[in-house]
Amino acid sequence: MATFHDLRARFTRALFPRDVRITFRINRRVAPDIIPIIERLAPGHHEAVTTLHAVLPFFRDERPVTSIVRGKDIMLYEEGPRFHCGKELYPLGGQLFVDRAGWLNLGPVATAELHGRLCEAIDTAAYRWISEHNALARATPCRQPRVRAIDDYLARLEMEAAAAAARLAESPSDHV
């Protein structure tokens, strides 16, 4: 019995025989950018399919999302790609979701300004937390690997201890 990949390959070969030649007329200004993409898509193997899925949003009616910043009630979706305009870097636009209100469409300047403010707020909150917990002394130059079997178990124990401490703080103290 043929596998799904064999059937797909046979179907593709039947629709697109190897002796078919395709000619493209490309503007010289965009040719250095377009020709490598066409060469990657032409073979039809897994890398070509992956590349096709990566560039598809650029050819649809929607813009690809390049960044998502999430809060409790608000999410900013930055749509790209980003372009240099003078000394600034601007996305194509963005959408802001506000809980219980809906979606706001943002232009390139508003999206860049809001994204910058949100990034500054994240940095400020993170540095404040680091200084409050004196955590900078524990920092290492490299990202630490995780041993999932041990680290996940310890994280679960820490969560259970925090939940128990919260419950203990909420209950009225009967003992002295």
Image (cartoon, rainbow, N blue to C red):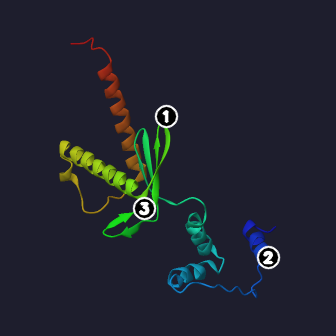
- Which of 152/59 is in front? 59
**Mark 3 — residue?**
91
**Mark 2 — residue?**
15
Mark 3 or 2, nearer chain start? 2
Q: Quadrant of the N terminus?
A: bottom right
**Mark 1 — residue?**
100
Which is more foreground, mark 3 or mark 2? 3
Residue in the image at 38% along x and 48% along y: 151
Place residue 3 in its image quadrant: bottom right
Cα–Cα span, label 3 and label 2: 39 Å
Mark 3 neighbour density, 10 Å: few (under 14) some (14–19) many (20 or more): many
Which is more foreground, mark 1 or mark 2? 1
Residue in the image at 30% along x and 69% along y: 87
Residue type beneath disc 3: Pro
SS of the residue at dot 1? loop
The answer to whether residue 76 is above or below residue 38 is above
Q: Position of residue 11 (x, y in %)?
A: 79, 73
Residue 89 lies left or right of residue 68; in this view the side is left
Residue type beneath disc 1: Arg
Please tell me how many numbered marks the rendered image carries: 3
SS of the residue at dot 2? helix
Residue in the image at 31% along x and 50% along y: 117
Mark 3 or 1, nearer chain start? 3
Residue type beneath disc 2: Leu
- Which of 171/52 is in front? 52
Residue 6 lies left or right of residue 97; in this view the side is right
Residue in the image at 56% along x and 78% along y: 37
Cα–Cα span, label 1 and label 2: 49 Å
